[in-house]
Amino acid sequence: EVALWNLADDDSSIVPLLVCIHGDVVTTLMWRERTINEPHLLITSSADGYIFIHKLTTNFTTASLHI
């Protein structure tokens, strides 16, 4: 299993985001930062030969209630 935690948040109830589940032992985990216009990449591979490339983006939505 590959999980991602937001440790920058000082909330005491930090819940990990499950990114993926490999069928075997995870052998490689690489974080690749990109520019402001491109998403960050989390690249994982396992002993079963699968390589997963995860695009990690942030979606900030501001909602306002107008009555």
Image: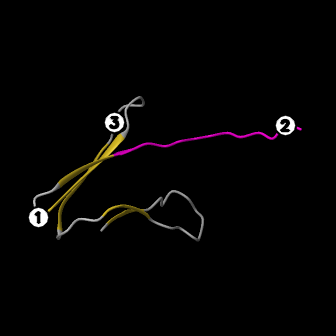
Q: What SS does tag 1 mark?
A: loop
Percent x, y of residue 63: 71, 40
Evaluate if marks 3 and 1 touch, with contact meaning CB atoms under 8 Å apart. Answer: no
Identify which amino acid the numbered label 2 is placed on: His
- Residue 1 higher or lower than 60, as above or below: below
Eye-nearest disc, 3 or 2 = 2
- How many numbered tags mark residues here? 3
Identify which amino acid the numbered label 1 is placed on: Asp
- Residue 19 higher or lower than 31, as above or below: below
Eye-nearest disc, 3 or 1 = 1
Residue at the far top in the pictured view? 37
Q: What SS does tag 2 mark?
A: loop
- Residue 11 higher or lower than 55, as above or below: below
**Residue at figure coordinates x 20%, y 68% from the top left:** 23
Evaluate if marks 2 and 1 touch, with contact meaning CB atoms under 8 Å apart. Answer: no
Residue 66: which numbered mark, if any?
A: 2
Foreground pick, 50 / 40: 50
Q: Residues within 10 Å of mark 3 (few under 14, many from 20)?
A: few
Percent x, y of residue 44: 22, 56
Q: If the image is split into quadrants, where does the N terminus sit?
A: bottom left
2 relative to 64 in the view: left or right: left
Q: What SS does tag 3 mark?
A: loop
Report, in whole angstroms, how far the alpha carbon at label 3 lies from the one at label 2.
37 Å
- Mark 3 = which residue? 34
Residue 48: which numbered mark, if any?
A: 1
- Looking at the rendering, the stretch of residues picked out in magenta corresponds to 55-67
Q: Is residue 64 magenta?
A: yes
Report, in whole angstroms, how far the alpha carbon at label 3 lies from the one at label 1.
28 Å
22 relative to 64 in the view: left or right: left
Badge 2 or badge 1: first in the primary sequence: 1
Residue 65: which numbered mark, if any?
A: none
